Image: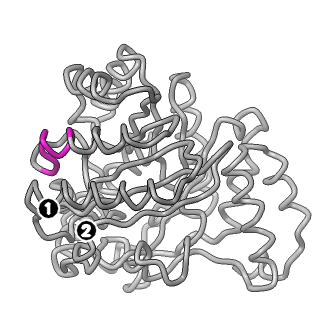
């Protein structure tokens, strides 16, 4: 495990350093002016829609937690403004006449945290989502916000759709999760949340990060292998792997600009996936394996992102997209046949 902090600060003070850096980088994102954004991508037998709603932002991020997250840089919006934005977004999506497999609604924080999203806002989102002919409704919330009562509320309010609760674990390793990622999550709270979701008979996906600071490529791969296998041990959970992108107002950006963070490359990501068995790959979903559009407002806060060279990028991206859509390990294994010179350089 790498530790270049001897010349910068004591590793035990990393959380304090990252929190201070986040406060220095804080600004209100231009995205809040829009109020909502969404992206659409092919997924299984239809499309997956990710709907982002501006809100007051994540209270945990505002307190300095989560070195990778940018959900702290939003100005407060009123209940009414959030509801109006949600209705506008759903109206636009309905007008596209798409075959929707899943819709994921993100309120720039935790769905069940009333300090970030009120009960009135949740009810409005439920009503709007019910207007869509989608198979599944997904939302994200921190494990500490989950309760049987709130899960029951969602089950009652969402009609004729499967429901999936998405929770962020980032790593099953306490040190990586709470020191290197500054997540502030007790694994016992994660386990309690899984138990509540299981008892509510809902689906669950668990977000995991690939690319922790101060770890070698080999240690990053070991961390994600252990984390995925820990999540799969619960049987009801789908692990979703996110490579880290460097965003403007994050602690990771501060490390990057100080030369203390080396972003993962696409080939690191491919090599990591190839460490899983075919059976494991069939249960894994990947996300943010690309910048979805160079001009997209969704990517406005990205400072740097992982890459290959222009020569092989199209082929690599196609295979990763196909793997995300169909969960077929073949698309990952086929990438081993690419012998591009950038694979040795990046």
Q: Quadrant of the C terminus?
A: bottom right
What is the secondary structure assignment of the residue under circle 2?
loop
Q: Quadrant of residue 220?
A: bottom right
Q: Pick whichever, 252 or 303, lies toward us.
A: 303
Question: Of label 1 and label 2, which has the lower sequence position?
Answer: 2
Q: Is residue 180 visible?
A: no
Q: CA distance from mark 1 to mark 2?
A: 8 Å
Q: Which residue is mark 1?
A: 81
At 39% from the left and 35% from the top, the residue drawn is 165
Q: Pick whichever, 337 or 201, lies toward us.
A: 201
Please provide the residue range marked out in magenta: 116-123
Residue 289 lies left or right of residue 236; in this view the side is right
Q: Is residue 118 magenta?
A: yes
Q: Pick whichever, 182 or 125, lies toward us.
A: 125
At 64% from the left and 77% from the top, the residue drawn is 307
* Residue 35: image tag: 2
What is the secondary structure assignment of the residue under circle 1?
helix
Residue 168 percent across, percent down from the top left: 38, 45
* Category of crowding for the residue at label 2, using alpha-carbon neighbours closer than 10 angstroms: few (below 14), some (14–19), many (at least 20): some
Instruction: Say whether marks 1 and 2 touch (CB < 8 Å).
Output: yes
Residue 70 percent across, percent down from the top left: 30, 67
Q: Main secondary structure of the magenta part?
A: helix
């Amino acid at each position: 495990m790498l530790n270049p902090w001897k010349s910068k600060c004591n590793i035990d003070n990393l959380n304090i350093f990252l929190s201070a850096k986040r406060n220095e980088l804080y600004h209100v994102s231009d995205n809040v002016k829009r109020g909502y954004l969404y992206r659409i991508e092919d997924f299984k037998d239809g499309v997956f829609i990710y709907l982002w709603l501006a809100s007051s932002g994540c209270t945990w991020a505002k307190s300095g937690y989560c070195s990778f997250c940018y959900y702290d840089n939003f100005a407060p919006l009123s209940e009414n403004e959030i509801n109006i934005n949600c209705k506008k977004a759903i109206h636009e999506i309905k007008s596209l006449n798409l075959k929707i497999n899943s819709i994921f609604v993100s309120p720039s924080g935790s769905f069940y945290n009333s300090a970030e999203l009120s009960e009135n806002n949740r009810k409005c989102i439920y009503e709007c989502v019910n207007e869509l002919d989608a198979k599944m409704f997904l939302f994200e919330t921190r494990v500490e916000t989950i309760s049987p009562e709130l899960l029951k509320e969602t089950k009652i309010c969402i009609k004729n759709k499967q429901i999936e609760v998405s929770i962020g674990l980032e790593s099953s390793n306490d040190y990586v999760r709470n020191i290197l990622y500054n997540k502030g999550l007790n694994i016992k709270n994660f386990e309690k949340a899984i138990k509540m979701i299981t008892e509510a008979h809902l689906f669950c996906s668990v977000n995991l990060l690939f690319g922790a600071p101060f770890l070698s490529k080999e240690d990053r791969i070991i961390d994600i292998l252990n984390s995925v296998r820990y999540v799969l041990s619960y049987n009801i959970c789908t692990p979703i792997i996110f490579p880290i992108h460097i965003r403007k107002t994050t602690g990771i950006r501060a490390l990057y600009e100080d030369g203390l963070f080396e972003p993962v490359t696409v080939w690191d990501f491919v090599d990591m996936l190839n460490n899983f068995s075919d059976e494991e790959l069939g249960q894994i979903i990947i996300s943010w394996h690309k910048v979805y559009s160079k001009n997209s407002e969704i990517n406005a806060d990205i400072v740097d992102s992982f890459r290959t060279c222009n020569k092989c990028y199209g082929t690599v991206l196609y295979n990763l997209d196909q793997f995300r859509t169909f969960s077929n390990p073949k698309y990952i294994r086929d990438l081993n046949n690419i012998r591009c010179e950038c694979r040795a350089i990046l």
